[in-house]
Amino acid sequence: MVSAAAPALAATPLSPALGSVITGLDLGRCTDDARTMRALIDLLHQRGVLVIKGQNLSDADYVRFGRQWGRPLEFFIKEHRRQDHPEMIRINNDPATPPALRDGAVHWHSDGSYEAEPAAVTMLYGKEAPREGGETLFASTAAAFEALPAGRRMTLEGLVAIHELGAAPWIEGETPPDPNRPKRDMPRQRHPLVIRHPVTGRRALFTSGTACGIEGMDQEAAMALIHFLRAHITQRQFRISYKVLPGDIVLWDNYSTVHSATPVAYSDAEGERRLLYRISTKGMPALCRA
Ligand SMILES: [Fe+2]
């Protein structure tokens, strides 16, 4: 909950299940303001996705804002990293992009679910947006869990899933990444199928885009359950679509949501360019640990 002392944010829901849009806030003036930052953090934890409109931050201020949400990561594909700010990943549709590095996120996932410690919060800062396409889809894994019958929820709570990058079953509308996309040689990870948010305690399904087995369950039954849950999570009532526009900072909580990019044309023509800067964090915001 937002504490009584927190400043009121002008927030409008994107849908009943998730997402809020904030206007009238200049992050350049309040990145170091603990009360405003705590109100933003609490709102993200309640709503899963935040869109903060009309921002004009320097790169250094954006990284400082990013650090308020946890420890920023350095992404494993070095071609995507910015040399001057390695916490920032450049996402664009430059036609020179090799096929193996295109459309790597056009499938439902939460960030870093194939790691021992998945990402907590991810944010995109919009610099350029194409006139057509480039929407990001989000779905609430918390609302999807709460909509299941009580008996089903209890059964799921005891299960542990196995995660591996690129090994999950695909669902309708997803584009499997190019087989030559850079991979990480890393061990499979175990994560509970139902996770608890470390701050709010709210439960959510965690099949993400990398669950490829369930401990103690035969593989066919496990894949059928994972496929069912992924299709359940991405139903219309749990889902929103948002196109990141210039000046937007869009954040999502990887504990309670999954997201998917949508295909975008690779073009540097006027009105077709896309440029976003991504920061992804792990761990809890320092303000929540205080
Ligand atoms: Fe992602």
Image (tube, rainbow, N blue to C red):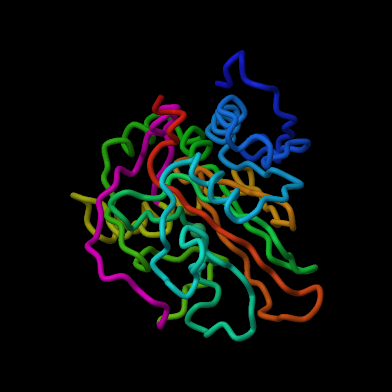
Is residue 12 left or right of 225 when viewed as pictured?
A: right
Percent of width and height locating residue 81: 48, 68
Which residue is pictured at 63% across the width and 43% down the height? Answer: 237
Question: Which one is nearer the viewer's eye here, 157 or 283?
Answer: 283
Percent of width and height locating residue 230: 46, 53
Percent of width and height locating residue 50: 63, 41
The secondary structure that most of the magenta stretch takes on is: loop
Residue 106 position (above or below residue 257): below
Which residue is pictured at 72% across the width and 48% down the height? Answer: 55
Quarter where residue 93 is shown: bottom right
Which residue is pictured at 67% across the width and 22% down the height? Answer: 7
Which residue is pictured at 41% across the width and 46% down the height? Answer: 71
Residue 152 position (above or below residue 262): above
Task: For the N terminus, give its image quadrant.
Answer: top right
Task: For the C terminus, give its image quadrant.
Answer: top left
Is residue 66 left or right of 219 when viewed as pictured?
A: right
Specify whether residue 140 is painted magenta.
no
Is residue 216 left or right of 234 when viewed as pictured?
A: left
Quarter where residue 159 is shown: top left
Q: Tag count in the figure?
A: 0
Residues in magenta?
180-207
Specify whether residue 182 is painted magenta.
yes
Question: Which one is nearer the viewer's eye here, 95 or 47?
Answer: 95
Quarter where residue 97 is shown: bottom right
